[in-house]
Amino acid sequence: MLRAFLLGCRKRFSPLLNRPCRALGNDHLAIGALGEKIACAHLRAEGRRILYRNFRAPGGGEIDVVARDGRTLSFVEVKTRTSEEFGRPLDAVDNKKKKLMQRGASEWLRLLGTRDLPWRFDVVEVILLEGENPRVKTVEDVTG
């Protein structure tokens, strides 16, 4: 019960999650970087522990955030949008992106020396609309 209270406080008082967005223009790198910071704050508010950000495997694989969700290792792709005009951010996680995530996860697990632990692929959707607080949603287990 205390843990739930503390997590609620973390979400309620996080400046990244509770500050209206300002105009970001067309700087896609800045938008993506802000989205990743917001996603990490959101994941921490959910009780996850951030282990690594922007992991790049030698074979071309990539993981935006590696996190622990209890005993489960979570490989997270962050998708940030400044408009809902073209659908959900999750829709941008196509088979090509999933293959990059799989390569990155395989390399991370190889570096750990084991695949014998629970793990999954998640996506954090971040929508930044000017004048509104960021809208953030975690979609778990996006394999397939």
Image (cartoon, helix red, strand yellow):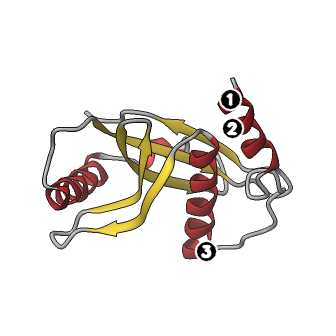
List x then y, in percent, for residue 57: 23, 68
Give the CA distance from mark 1 to mark 2.
5 Å
Q: Amino acid at mark 2?
A: Leu
List x then y, in percent, for residue 88: 54, 41
List x then y, in percent, for residue 31: 61, 68
- Name the residue carrying label 3: 30
SS type, badge 3 = helix
Q: Relative to residue 17, is residue 93 drawn left or right? A: left
Q: Relative to residue 81, is residue 51 drawn left or right? A: left
Residue, far front: 2
Q: Amino acid at mark 1?
A: Ala
- Name the residue carrying label 1: 4
Give the CA distance from mark 3 to mark 1.
32 Å
Taking the spot 18% from the left edge, 62% from the top edge, the residue there is: 111
Q: Residues within 10 Å of mark 2 (few under 14, many from 20)?
A: some
**Of residues 83 and 117, which is closer to you in this image?**
117
Taking the spot 48% from the left edge, 55% from the top edge, the residue there is: 50
Give the CA distance from mark 3 to mark 2.
28 Å
Q: Residues within 10 Å of mark 3 (few under 14, many from 20)?
A: few
Q: Residues within 10 Å of mark 1 (few under 14, many from 20)?
A: few
Q: Amino acid at mark 3?
A: Ala
Quarter occupied by the N terminus: top right
Sequence-first disc among 3 and 2: 2
- Name the residue carrying label 2: 7
SS type, badge 2 = helix
Instruction: State whether residue 19 is above or below residue 116.
Output: below
Sequence-first disc among 3 and 1: 1
* Residues tagged 1 and 2 counted as in contact (Cβ below 8 A): yes
**Of residues 21 and 122, which is closer to you in this image?**
122
